[in-house]
Amino acid sequence: MEFRPLNAPPAVAAVAAAARRRRRRVALIVLLAAIAGGVFRQRGPRTDAAGAGDATAAPAVRPARVVPDSVRIKVEVINATSTRGLGRLATAWLRDQGFDVVGTGTAPSADRRDSTLVLDRSGHPDWARLAAAALGGARVEARADSLRYVDLTVLIGRSWRPPPQSLYP
């Protein structure tokens, strides 16, 4: 039974009923989409009966640790490019390889660099070469500075590219 105002013509009542039906359909579609999204989000990655992961998902490869376990190499990473986040990516990459990154920062715009430079601050050129190799090749310079509490300063240049795989899966 449909209720309408006593003085409303039948055509207005029909239009109002059609609008209510459209609103109900839209509400039903939104509700079904929300339920479907929740179901798919809870499912997670597919596993087979043995518990192995989905064959299409490539496993994240962690870099090999290049710093010996008995050594602590303190590093500061300076982003010397205009690319935001490049220093953060280099920090994560160096930490994954065993370096102790104790500080990060951004170089002033006047000090932007094209290539990556590793500065030896503590007189350990072999540690600087390790960091340069870990970054895929960089120039190494000895610039001793006893006022800094770091062994190496890494100035990330525009030519450095982060690894293709994700750093934090």
Image (spheres, helix red, strand yellow):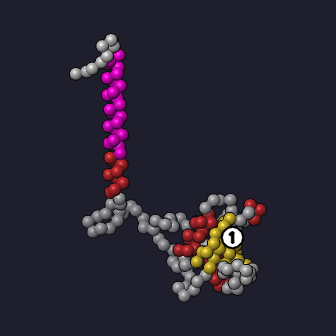
Q: Report the magenta residues as a range.
A: 9-34
View extreme (right): residue? 110
Compared with 18, 159 (above or below) is below
Q: Which residue is mark 1?
A: 155
Q: Is residue 93 left or right of residue 20?
A: right
Please tell me how crowded label 1 is: few (under 14), some (14-19), or many (20+) other residues with Cα within 10 Å: many
User: Which of the 4 image quarters holds residue 77?
Assistant: bottom right
User: Which of the 4 image quarters holds residue 1?
Assistant: top left
Q: Position of residue 68 (x, y in %)?
A: 55, 85
Q: Position of residue 145 (x, y in %)?
A: 74, 81
User: Observer-nearest residue: 168 or 150?
Assistant: 150
Q: Position of residue 4 (x, y in %)?
A: 30, 18
Compared with 32, 98 (above or below) is below
Q: Is residue 49 left or right of residue 16?
A: left
The residue located at (67%, 85%) in the rendering is 124
User: Which of the 4 image quarters holds residue 25?
Assistant: top left
The residue located at (52%, 79%) in the rendering is 65
- Across the whole image, how many numbered discs are drawn on residues? 1
Q: Position of residue 126 (x, y in %)?
A: 65, 85
The residue located at (61%, 75%) in the rendering is 102
Q: Is residue 30 magenta?
A: yes
Q: Is residue 102 left or right of residue 57?
A: right
Q: Amino acid at mark 1?
A: Leu
User: Observer-nearest residue: 95 or 104?
Assistant: 104
User: Observer-nearest residue: 114 or 96?
Assistant: 96
View extreme (bottom): residue? 70
Secondary structure mostly seen in magenta is helix
Secondary element type, mark 1: strand
